[in-house]
Image (cartoon, grey):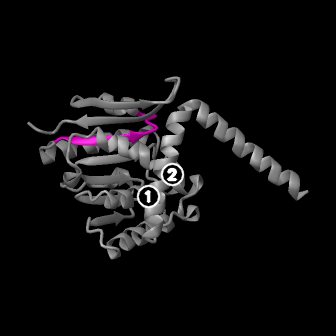
Amino acid sequence: MAAPSVLNRLQSKYLHLSKHIKNVGIKTFIVTKIYDHYIGLKLKALGVSYNNNATASPLHAVVESALKDAHENQPSSFYAVKNGLGAVPLPQAEISLLDIGCGNGKILTFGMLLQLKAVTGIELDEGALEKAISNCSKMQQKGYTTPFNITGTDAVNYIIPESVNVIYLFNPFGSQTMQKVAANIAHHAKQSNKDVYIIYCMPSFEYVFEALDKCTKLFEMYNKDKSQKELTVLKIAGRQ
């Protein structure tokens, strides 16, 4: 009975992979895989790991979130984030990154590897939170000096640190929470009197930001046939 089960899993994996290649195109697929593998090996050599068991289940995330619309943590692509950061008109050494729903700290450790000015994360799941802190601590032990701060809190109640100028989102919650977070980001930009940039992967609720008075779009990435947006980069103007 085991053989058919293994075969079914392999078949499902093959179909998923084939669909993904068809969606993004073979060139983008290969480039992404090579870059992600390269960065993954560099981080692994530093002792960083991303244990899937440390991520929240969908049910747990929904129960813990203030407005009951949190989504399951999803793995980000280093290549996609690299493209997003490339669209932000700031030197990497001046970027203070906030990852809302940071999971195991994958993007935080990537930011440390890139020697960003600072990285900050918030996460509801305790297991993922502990793993993120452990991963970032290992980066510092290996000589990466980017300061990090990771907090277990809900995005609705979170006060964005004044230093933050880039925010990363991977479709972390539903429209209700996104409305609150967008308003919070706009308030942060105004209060800090500086432009804030948003790198938004799988931007299901991009329209929430587009409704803001001072929001402009800087960059977009689509799949091969333009049927699905993979990433968008937005600017929330804060300078008077």
Q: Is residue 198 magenta?
A: yes
The residue drawn where x is 19% and y is 43% is 189
In the rendered image of this protein, does residue 28 appear above or below residue 109?
above
Instruction: Check disc 1 and give the amino acid type.
Output: Lys
Task: Give the image location of residue 131, x and y in percent.
Answer: 46, 68
Kindly indicate the quadrant of the structure image that contains residue 119: bottom left
Q: Residues within 10 Å of mark 2 (few under 14, many from 20)?
A: some
The residue drawn where x is 52% and y is 55% is 61
Q: Which residue is mark 2?
A: 75
The part of the chain drawn in magenta is: 195-205
The residue drawn where x is 22% and y is 28% is 213
Residues at marks 2 and 1, CA–CA distance in whole angstroms: 8 Å
Kindly indicate the quadrant of the structure image that contains residue 83: top left
Instruction: Check disc 2 and give the amino acid type.
Output: Pro
Asked if the residue at tag 1 contacts the one at tag 2, i.e. Cβ–Cβ closer than 8 Å, the answer is yes
Q: Nearer the viewer, residue 169 or 107?
A: 107
Task: Decide if residue 50 is on the left or right side of residue 145.
Answer: right
Does residue 68 appear anywhere in the picture? no
In the rendered image of this protein, does residue 153 appear above or below residue 221?
below
- Number of on-image labels: 2
Q: Which residue is mark 1?
A: 106
Task: Give the image location of residue 26, x and y in percent.
Answer: 56, 34
In the rendered image of this protein, does residue 183 appear above or below residue 216?
below
Task: Decide if residue 59 is on the left or right side of residue 208.
Answer: right
Task: Give the image location of residue 232, x and y in percent.
Answer: 37, 34
Does residue 172 appear anywhere in the picture? yes
